Amino acid sequence: MLRQGTLTHNMSDCSIDGVYQAGRHIVEPSGSGHVHIGRNLGSTPVVLDVLYADPAGSPLAVDAPNPGCAFE
């Protein structure tokens, strides 16, 4: 759940698929086919409560190269 701030979420094709405000829930599938880009474009820090539902021993995150988006 987004506790504080505003999170702008982009898909792997760089398109924005959501702008989330405090109080909203975000669900993101895991795995190599799901690249997620979450950015804080505001001045308030983003604070998230996160629940990972992946198999035991799975990494919590895997870095991926920029898919070609104009931002970094």
Image: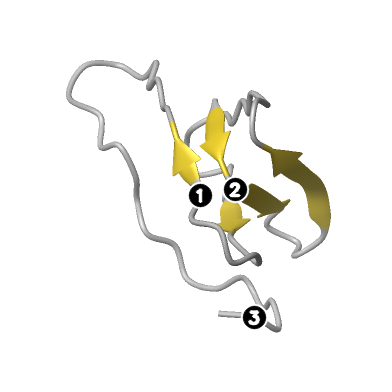
Q: Is residue 66 left or right of residue 14?
A: left
In this view of the protein, which residue sits in the foreground, 45 or 69?
45
Q: Are marks 1 and 3 in contact (CB under 8 Å)?
A: no
For residue 63, side relative to residue 1 (left or right): left
In this image, 62 relative to 71: left or right? left
User: Which class describes the residues within 10 Å of circle 2: few (<14), some (14-19), or many (20+)?
Assistant: some
For the point 59% across and 56% down, the residue is 37
Q: Amino acid at mark 2?
A: Gly
Mark 3 residue type: Phe
Please name the residue that numbered disc 3 is placed on: 71
Residue 66: x percent and y percent?
55, 73
Q: Give the x, y percent position of residue 13.
A: 76, 62
Residue reaching furthest to the bottom: 70
Residue 57, position as x, y percentages in the image? 17, 24
Residue 38's disc is: none
Answer with mark 1 or mark 2, whichever residue precedes in sequence: 2
Write the residue at 36% across / 19% down: 54
- CA gap, disc 1 to disc 3? 18 Å
Q: Nearer the viewer, residue 21 or 72?
A: 21
Asked if the residue under mark 2 is in contact with the one under mark 1, i.e. CB atoms within 8 Å, the reply is: yes
Instruction: Count residues near mark 1 (Cα–Cα under 10 Å), then give few for <14, some for 14-19, many for 20+.
Output: some
Residue denoted by label 2: 5
The residue labelled by disc 1 is: 46
**Circle nearer the N terminus (1, 3):** 1
Name the residue: 59% across, 60% down.
Answer: 39
Q: Could you tell which of marks 2 and 3 lies nearer the N-terminus?
A: 2
